[in-house]
Every structure is written in C-alpha cells, then in structure tokens.
Image (spheres, coloured by chain):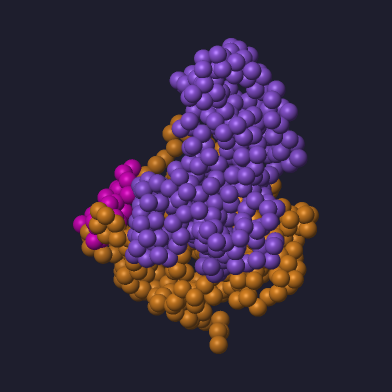
Chain colours: A orange, B purple
C-alpha cells in the first residue's frame, strides 16, 4: 500500500488558533511540511514559535478547546488524521507516531515503577494485544538497546532513583518499542547537562540509522539539529520561513531570520564583547500582520513584505518565504529539476 | 519503617501529655466545686469537706495533676463524681458505638468523595462538575447539627424511611458483646438482620457527620486531579496511546490522592469532635453524648478521659495516613 513515493508525514496548509479571552490567537498559519521515509528533519525556532504545538496538535495532543484547527490536512503514510476520533488517534499515537519530550524529569510518573510504565506503554502501543510477559521482554530488550546499564534492576526502579540522562534513555526506549513510523523528538536534550546531551544525541543518531527512523527533531539549537538531521525547517511566529538541507542552512542561509539565528551563534575561537541578537520582539499573534511576520524586525524589509509571501526555491530542496528572492528564478530552478 | 512507627509512637506519648496538661488546666480553672458535686446537693458542709479530703480535691492543682498521671499510668481513668461509675467501664461501653459511627461516616465520605472529586475534574466546567461542586459547597456551609435535625425531620418523620435515633429498635435483641460494634457483633453472631438494622440506624447520623468531610474530600481531590491531569507525565502517557480510564484511575489518581489522604486524616479528627453534636441530635449512645453530659455537669474525669482517648485516636489515624503516604509514594518511602 505504501511505496517510497508516499511521504511518511505530510502536513498541508495547517492552521491552528487558540480562542482566548482577549481574542483569537493565530498560533500556526498555513504550515506545509513533507517528510519522506528515513528522513530526519530538524524543526527550529525560538520558544513560542509554535513548533511544539504544531507537532502535538497534528496528533490530537492539544486540548480543543481552547485550540481550534481552522484549516489543513495531516496525513500519515497517506492516511488522513484530522477528524479521526479520539479512540482512533490513540491507536495512531504510540504505535505509529512516537514522541519524546524535553524534560525527562517530569515526563515519567513519579509513583509508578519504570517497568510498569514501560509495560503499560508497550501494551497500549500493541492495542492491548501484547501479553504482560511479552511486553516485559520487549521492555528489557529496549532498555538494553538504549544502553541503560543493568536493565533488570532499572526495570524495578522508580523515576527518582535515576539520573536525567537515564530517564531520557527510558523515555526513548518507551517511544521506540513499537518501531514507530515517525518519531517526534521535542527538544530531547535541552534539559540535560552538556556531556549527557552529547551521549543522548549520539544514541539518537545511532537509532535513526539502525532502525531507519523517520524523525522530526524540534530544537531551538541549530548545532544540536546538525548532529542528527539531514534537513531543517525554520519556523518563526507560527509560519515556516525556510526549509533546506542542513548544509545549505549553514552555507547559504537565505531568510533574514535564519541569517540572524546563525549570526547569534557565538564563534568558538573568536572572542566577542557582545553576542549578536535580533532586535525587536515577536509580532502580536492576536492581530498578526498579513504579510511576512518577520518584516517588523527585518533590516531588509520593503513594501512587498506587507503582502502574503509565497515560497521560492533558491537551491536544490531549498525553499524560502522571502520577497528578497525572485519568484521567476524559482520557476527556472524548478524547471531544471 | 519500624523505626518511624516507634518514633511516632514515642512522640504520641509526649503529645498526649501535652493534651493532658491543657485539658487538666482548663477543667480545673472552670468554676464549680467537684467536692460539692460528688457529695450531692443535700450534703452538709462537713460531708463536703470529708469528700474533699477523701478524694484529694484539697491538694494544689499541680500535685493533683501528678496524682492523676500516676493513676493514668496504672490504667485507671478515675471515677465519675456524678454517677460514681468507673470511667474506664463507661468508655468501654460507649467508645465502640462512636468508633462504629465514625468509621461508617468516614467510609461514606471517602467512597463517595474520591470518585466525585475525580468526576468533577474530568467534567471540568460541565454540568456534572457544577452539580458536584454545589454538593461540596453545601457540605462545607451547612452546620452538622442543623443538617442532622433536617434529616431527622424529613427522612425520619415525614417520609418514615429511617429511625429517629438510637443504635437499635426497642424490640431488637442486642448481639453478644465481642467488639461492642453492633454491626460486627451481629455478623459474628450470624445475625445479618440485626447487623442491617444497626446499620440502618446509623445512616442519618453518619450522613450528618460525613457531609462536611465529603465536601472537603471532593474539593481537594478535584483540585489535585485538575493539577495532575495537566502534568507532563500525563501528556507522555497519552502520547503512548494509553487509554483514558487507565490514565485517570491510575496514572493521575495515584498522584492526586496524596494530598487528599492528608485531608482525610484531618477530617477524621473533626468527625470525632463532631460526634458530640451529632450523637446528641440522634440520641446515639456514644462517647460524644457521654462527654456532652459530663461537660454539662462539670464531671471532670470523664471529660479528661474522652479528650485523651479521642486525641489518641486522632494521632493513631494520622500515623496510619502517613504510613499510607509511604505506601503510595516511593519518594516518601525512601526518606524514612
């Protein structure tokens, strides 16, 4: 049923608003994302840009109300997910789409043993088909796979008896037990010490390769994304502004926001007096601008930025939503492909 | 664990001593002459003085306190100056009735309070939630004795569904005394009919006694559930595809129930105190009614005994609650 041409995940024209006391908050606006099998994509942007909301809402993890999906479609291997019942979505979550989150300290239940939580998750992922013994065997196998020392013992531990890095390994084991079609890693290393971060990233890179995982990795850190992903989508204020292979982002960042993000990375060998930053702040999403949402902070903004901006192709697999690039050029490039 | 229990039991003795000092002082600064009370209203002044010397009422208060403590240490709770009966025997007679009533009441409060709190949280801001919250607010606002009177008036007098008061009907046989709790004694005696009659007699007083506790448990459990349902580990459980029943009844409730447990312990103490009011309304022969009668006649030793015993019951309950905490929360278990 699925061939290589069917994307694992395709998000089309996805918009989401929050109905708040102050008005309608336009959190995500007409987002498009395509993920092919085996692809590891980074989704970067600053806190509050909507990257977590996007990936959670697509799989029914954002409470509605207050959230409301106003347009779009989300297909997983060709199957439409929006409009599915809670029960059907529950069958998708865990089994087909797995998630790991930012803070391993708070994502494990403090009053249940690690083993109980793993077995529960694995049985839920199997739709209740796996027996307790099967789930237990798989849980121990997964703990071994994520290189958790002494799995038998950790199986009987409570979360507070494990370090942050160990807990993240447990959560990764839990997420990957069902061999999901898609893994969403939501800032999986942000809350960890730098040395542990490196270990977890190594582990994830290893698992992506071994298991042929298709993955979206959410991060605000381009450096972290570069270690695991082959492609990056940059998000700003609820919109994707640039989508490119990872090398392209570093070699030829095209959107002024992406350029600003890269300029803000401190250089390891060049001491600076003051770190670069992007002036201004996020637009008011209760009344978002019709055109480019970054225009108000952009040094290169001009009259055309006030109208809605389409994507232009500026290189192989490299798209950007910015009026600085010529739409005609896009057509030529597209023709060459 | 054993160390914790021993430590807490040791602390309990200290706390009971403190309770004894306070109660003893209050009882002795209260107006009234215990010697006159013991000798009776018709006794001559000489007879009153004779009683005073016999029973040691002429000694200074601190001395009398230590004499009383010595008496307690020997397990002697004293004698009522009013009825001349041994207080220990009275307590043995009345305490089981009160314990039976309070245990029944706290069971009602917990069995209904926790699920209602959970449902209110799950149905947040929907009709069911509003209904449950109305019950919770009423329970907190209505005084126990007034509620008791209204229940008596409507359910016992108007509708004739329940007896007005007492532990059993006039013509019911009391089962042989084993625990003193009629429901249990009747069941042990193989007489479920009498057990049911006794339970039926407890329904109205237990409702009056349990409503404030029920209200408190609902409110705390609802608030805790709302908080816990928003926690990250619940999001993770949902992301794993775990079903809503398991998430609510296990993942969330086991966390939310911890503060609720503390509330249950506190409310158990309030209930013990509440028996003084409710047993009076329902003419239920327990220690509450006994203490109320003793207080009216300034009968000092029964008041002391009831205070100390209810105090001890409160402390034991809270120790049990703390142990339950450790049972449910591994983080607490590691600390002890």
**Which residue is outermost to the left?**
A303
Counting from the top left corner in percent of width and height, residue B146 is at 36, 48
Q: How many marks?
A: 0
Q: A56 or B156, which lies in front? A: B156
Q: A191 or B200, which lies in front? A: B200
Residue A74 is at least partly visible in this image:
yes
Counting from the top left corner in percent of width and height, residue A255 is at 38, 57
Query: Which of the 4 quarters of the picture holds residue B254?
Result: bottom right
Say left or right for A93 vs A12.
Answer: right
The main secondary structure of the magenta stretch is loop
Residue A301 belongs to the span the image colors magenta = yes
Q: Is residue A241 above or below residue B22?
A: below
Q: Is residue B30 above or below residue B127?
A: above
Q: A173 or B200, which lies in front? A: B200
Give the residue displayed 44% in from the left and 57% down from the top: B164
Residue A65 is at least partly visible in this image:
no
Which residue range is magenta in the image? Answer: A279-303
Residue B15 belongs to the span the image colors magenta = no
Q: A107 or A147, which lies in front? A: A107
Q: Quadrant of the N terminus of chain A?
A: bottom right
Give the residue displayed 73% in from the left and 72% down from the top: A134
Counting from the top left corner in percent of width and height, residue B150 is at 36, 54
Give the residue displayed 60% in from the left and 67% down from the top: B193
Say left or right for B159 vs B40.
Answer: left
């Amino acid at each position: 049923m699925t061939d290589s041409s069917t994307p694992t995940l395709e998000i089309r024209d996805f918009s989401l608003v929050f109905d708040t006391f102050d008005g309608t908050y336009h959190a995500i606006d007409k987002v498009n994302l395509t993920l092919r099998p085996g692809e590891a994509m980074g989704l970067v942007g600053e806190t509050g840009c909507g990257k977590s909301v996007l990936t959670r809402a697509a799989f029914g993890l954002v409470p509605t109300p207050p959230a409301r999906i106003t347009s779009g479609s989300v297909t997983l291997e060709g199957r439409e997910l929006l409009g599915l019942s809670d029960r059907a979505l529950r069958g998708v979550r865990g089994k087909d789409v797995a998630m790991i989150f930012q803070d391993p300290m708070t994502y494990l239940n403090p009053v249940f043993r690690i083993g109980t939580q793993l077995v529960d998750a694995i049985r839920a992922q199997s739709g209740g088909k796996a027996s307790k013994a099967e789930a237990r065997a798989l849980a121990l196998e997964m703990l071994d796979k994520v290189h958790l020392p002494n799995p038998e013992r950790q199986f009987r531990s409570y979360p507070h008896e494990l370090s942050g890095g160990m807990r993240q390994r447990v959560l990764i084991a839990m997420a990957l037990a069902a061999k999901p079609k898609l893994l969403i890693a939501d800032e999986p290393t942000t809350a960890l010490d730098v040395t542990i971060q490196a270990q977890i990233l190594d582990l994830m890179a290893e698992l992506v390769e071994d298991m042929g995982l298709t993955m979206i990795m959410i991060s605000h850190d381009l450096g972290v994304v570069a270690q695991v992903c082959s492609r990056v989508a940059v998000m700003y204020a609820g919109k994707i502004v640039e989508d490119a292979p990872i090398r392209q982002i570093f070699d030829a960042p095209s959107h002024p926001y992406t350029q600003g993000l890269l300029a803000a990375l401190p250089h390891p060998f060049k001491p600076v007096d003051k770190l670069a930053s992007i002036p201004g702040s996020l637009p008011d999403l209760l009344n978002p601008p019709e055109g480019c949402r970054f225009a108000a902070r952009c040094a290169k903004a001009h009259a055309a930025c006030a109208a809605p901006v389409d994507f232009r192709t500026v290189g192989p697999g490299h798209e950007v939503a910015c009026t600085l690039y010529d739409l005609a050029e896009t057509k030529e490039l597209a023709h060459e492909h | 664990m054993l160390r914790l229990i021993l430590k807490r039991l040791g602390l309990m003795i200290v706390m009971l001593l403190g309770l004894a000092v306070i109660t003893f002082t209050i009882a002795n600064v209260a107006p009234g002459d215990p010697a006159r009370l013991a000798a009776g209203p018709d006794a001559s002044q000489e007879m009153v003085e004779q009683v005073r010397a016999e029973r040691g009422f002429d000694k200074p208060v601190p001395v009398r306190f230590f004499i009383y403590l010595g008496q307690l240490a020997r397990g002697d709770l004293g004698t009522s100056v009013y009825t001349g009966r041994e207080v220990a025997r009275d307590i043995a007679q009345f305490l089981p009735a009160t314990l039976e009533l309070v245990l029944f009441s706290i069971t009602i409060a917990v069995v209904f309070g926790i699920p209602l709190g959970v449902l209110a949280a799950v149905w947040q801001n929907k009709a069911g939630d509003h209904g449950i919250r109305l019950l919770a607010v009423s329970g907190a606002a209505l005084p126990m004795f007034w509620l008791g009177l209204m229940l008596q008036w409507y359910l016992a007098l108007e509708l004739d569904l329940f007896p007005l008061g007492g532990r059993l009907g006039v013509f019911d046989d009391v089962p042989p005394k084993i625990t003193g709790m009629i429901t249990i004694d009747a069941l042990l005696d193989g007489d479920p009919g009498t057990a049911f009659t006794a339970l039926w007699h407890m329904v109205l007083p237990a409702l009056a006694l349990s409503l404030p506790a029920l209200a408190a448990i609902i409110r705390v459990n609802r608030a805790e559930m709302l908080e816990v349902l928003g926690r990250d580990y619940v999001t993770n459980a949902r992301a794993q595809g775990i079903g809503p029943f398991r998430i609510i009844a296990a993942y969330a409730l086991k966390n939310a129930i911890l503060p609720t447990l503390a509330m249950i312990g506190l409310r158990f103490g309030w209930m013990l105190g509440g028996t003084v009011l409710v047993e009076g309304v329902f003419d239920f022969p327990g220690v509450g009614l006994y203490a109320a009668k003793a207080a009216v006649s300034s009968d000092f030793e029964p008041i002391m005994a009831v205070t100390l015993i209810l105090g001890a019951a409160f402390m034991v309950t809270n120790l049990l609650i703390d142990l339950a905490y450790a049972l449910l929360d591994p983080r607490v278990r590691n600390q002890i």
